Image: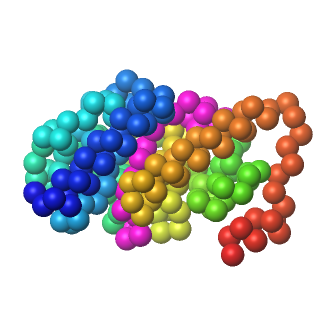
């Protein structure tokens, strides 16, 4: 293992622990993956807690999903792979069952094309529109099919009645995206019962340009 790959794996473990310590990942929920410098993919093992990932047990896979070393990957790894296969700008993926984004995913009548209408600039700047993937059993191939189709134009997604996914150019970028996603969902619920001033189409356009 090169020094660079070792450093990347240690950073991956550090970010898992950070998500756990911040209460964004609980129990064995949530999973992560990233593309390594040697063009393999590291993923969290099935049933593992993001708070206590171990270097020797990290799942190392090729782009066909074959396990090269370590433990069996998360059952949700197939959708991670589909994201990388359909958008080469995506280099890392974090999927959580974090409280506020998951609460949002349980609401009826969300806009399928953009599940959270913008009311702060940061979500728009980092993630643009966040599409909703309809509910399917966790690990279902239908989730993978939907994400394969959406990956080209998006870097974040919400799985209905399940939780958020955010990707990034690096694992740190994916972390920043999923934290922004969660924080915005929290604001959304805090604001319930109040009249929200949503950003106007003009303001959104300005942020995207
Ligand atoms: Zn999940």
Within the image, what quadrant is residue 109 found in? top right
Q: Nearer the viewer, residue 14 or 197?
A: 14
Q: How many marks?
A: 0
Q: Indicate yes or no whether the magenta region holds residue 106.
A: yes
Within the image, what quadrant is residue 125 found in? bottom right
Q: Residue at x 62, y 41 (%)?
A: 183
The answer to whether residue 182 is left or right of residue 116 is left
Q: Which residues are magenta?
A: 86-108
Q: Residue at x 23, y 65 (%)?
A: 37
The answer to whether residue 32 is left or right of residue 124 is left
Q: Residue at x 60, y 55 (%)?
A: 130
The answer to whether residue 136 is left or right of residue 38 is right
Residue 153: x and y in percent read: 53, 68
> Farthest residue toward the right?
195
**Which of the image's four quarters has the N terminus?**
bottom left
**Which of the image's four quarters has the C terminus?**
bottom right
> Farthest residue toward the top?
27
Q: Indicate yes or no whether the magenta region holds residue 18.
A: no
Residue 81: x and y in percent read: 31, 57
Residue 117 versus residue 88 in the image, above or below: above
Residue 164: x and y in percent read: 51, 43
Residue 36: x and y in percent read: 24, 60
Res. 133 in view: no
Res. 204 in view: yes
Q: Residue at x 72, y 38 (%)?
A: 188
């Amino acid at each position: 293992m090169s020094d660079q790959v070792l450093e990347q794996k240690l950073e991956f473990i550090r970010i898992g622990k950070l998500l756990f310590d911040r209460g964004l990942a609980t129990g064995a929920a949530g999973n992560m993956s990233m593309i390594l410098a040697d063009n393999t993919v590291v993923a969290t093992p099935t049933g593992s807690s993001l708070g206590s990932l171990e270097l020797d047990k990290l799942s190392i896979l090729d782009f066909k999903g074959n396990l090269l070393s370590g433990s069996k990957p998360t059952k949700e790894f197939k959708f991670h792979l589909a994201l990388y296969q359909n958008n080469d700008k995506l280099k890392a993926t974090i999927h959580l069952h974090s409280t506020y984004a998951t609460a949002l995913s349980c609401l009826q009548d969300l806009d399928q094309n953009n599940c959270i209408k913008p009311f702060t600039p940061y979500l728009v700047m980092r993630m643009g529109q966040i599409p909703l993937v309809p509910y399917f059993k966790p690990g279902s191939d239908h989730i993978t099919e939907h994400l394969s189709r959406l990956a080209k134009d998006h870097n974040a997604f919400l799985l209905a009645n399940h939780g958020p996914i955010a990707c990034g150019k690096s694992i740190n970028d994916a972390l920043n995206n999923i934290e922004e996603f969660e924080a915005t969902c929290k604001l959304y619920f805090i604001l319930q019962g109040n009249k929200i001033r949503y950003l106007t189409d003009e303001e959104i356009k300005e942020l995207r340009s």
